[in-house]
Image (cartoon, grey):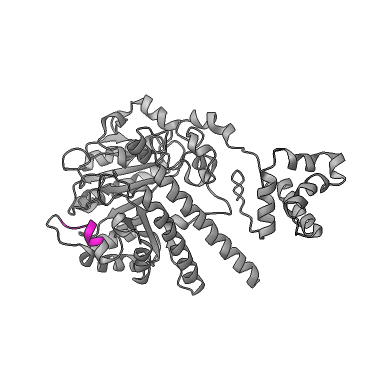
Amino acid sequence: MDVNSGSIHVVDDLVYTMIQALDSLDDENLFRCVLDNDEIKAEPFEKPGKILKETFPDVPEEDLREAYAEISELIEAETLFSEDIYEQYVEEFTNRESVVKALCLHIAHDCNLACRYCFAEEGEYHGKREIMSYEVGKAALDFLIQNSGGRYNLEVDFFGGEPLMNFQVIKKLVAYGRSMEKPHHKKFRFTLTTNGVLLNDEVIAFANKEMSNLVLSIDGRREVHDLMRPHRGGQGSYDEILPKFIKAAESRNQMDYYVRGTFTRNNLDFSNDAIHLADLGFEQISIEPVVADEKEEYAIRREDIPVILEQYDILAQELLRRKKEGRGVNFFHFMIDLSGGPCVAKRLSGCGSGTEYLAVSPSGELYPCHQFVGIPEFLLGTVDTGVTNMECRDKFKSCNVYAREKCRTCFAKFYCSGGCAANAYNFSGSIMDTYDIGCELQKKRIECAIMMKAAELTDDSAEN
């Protein structure tokens, strides 16, 4: 993989090893010298050839020349050892106009489950149980329209707690949003996240009409799910929600939704949970690692990393096998666009929390994202006043892969874009740092995603 261009090359062992050998040479300008100097071009293999023949004494010179020629072509095409063109945009990117494109509406700071790993303290978010009023939600949509600049598509997530505890207000807000689209030349894309307890035919019909995406929370196997996502009385919720989720997924033709789970130290064999969900018929699956203080018995620890990395390998191989058999499913963290990829802004800063993406509390307070809600130092303003805490906002504007030292030399930096600011803050005390365990897992997911895409491309090439 060439980090700066995003190019992926499927090569044989000789070329792979040769690239490593040449990259490790002291003369870092060797390739450029070979390509650009007329005198050396007359015999382009002469200088590196001597070194390569010493490095690969058992490989015929003809094979070395051919492999080297292929590498030289890739360098000349700027798809290997390409220059970093992104850092030059950092200052312009940091000083860009703040345009809000997405809101996470905390429609309900209340929940009807008692999930053991809930970062929102069972929906309370460091405060009291609270429901968002229609008036606050309406003001939030007005704020989004007014601060979205020339953007046409606007994203609004109905989040909680459990959003369906405030379903009537959700319906009214969607209707209001739709009424504002034509006058302001905007298009709202609504998303609903639900634990499924209150999901019914009315909600499914409404979601299918109005929601661009539906997120259904289920952790996998019954014993795994019920352990971590019980009712307040301790009884499990798996049997209660599963038939509803199956119905919702089928009603959406297995598109525009995710069953979204969380794995903990209690189910480090989470590949079995993903496979379980696939066996139930779900085709859009996401299972994320829990992020919790290591004092919690279910928290992931450093010593768990090797097991988790192996699980991603197992899952990647299984999903490849199923796809070949015509039973393919999409696993969220393995979905990477290698043909185009994200824009420069996305590569540099990811989700855009604190600038392009904000969270709104039930009382109308603005925060950088849902994980910062209720933390006083991250209060940005309100839907009525707009963003007034410019110092905090500007810190998030400066948050990019080049502002994080650990990201600068990471091969995955333009795929994860520096990772989650909230996780970095919770584990290091700074949004400019990283969550190291999360980094290790993210790098593995990206590695698996690239492997799967490369395997698919080579299979297609062989068939053709």
Which of the 4 image quarters holds residue 428?
Answer: top left
364 shown above or below 271: above
x and y, in percent, of residue 139 in the image: 28, 37
x and y, in percent, of residue 354 in the image: 38, 35
- Where the C terminus falls, by quadrant? bottom right
Which region is colored magenta? 225-231
226 within the magenta span: yes
- Is residue 264 visible in this depiction of the protein? no
303 shown above or below 423: below
Between 109 and 115, the one nearer to me in the picture:
115
x and y, in percent, of residue 170 in the image: 25, 50
- Is residue 47 visible in this depiction of the protein? yes
**Outermost residue toward the bottom in this view:** 325
Which of the 4 image quarters holds residue 284?
Answer: bottom left
From the viewer's perspective, is 88 left or right of 227?
right
Residue located at (64% from left, 67% from top): 461
Between 437 and 414, the one nearer to me in the picture:
437
x and y, in percent, of residue 323 in the image: 49, 70
Which of the 4 image quarters holds residue 146?
Answer: top left
From the viewer's perspective, is 267 left or right of 437?
left
71 within the magenta span: no
From the viewer's perspective, is 112 left or right of 327?
left
430 shown above or below 447: above
Residue located at (68% from left, 50% from top): 19
Q: How many marks?
A: 0
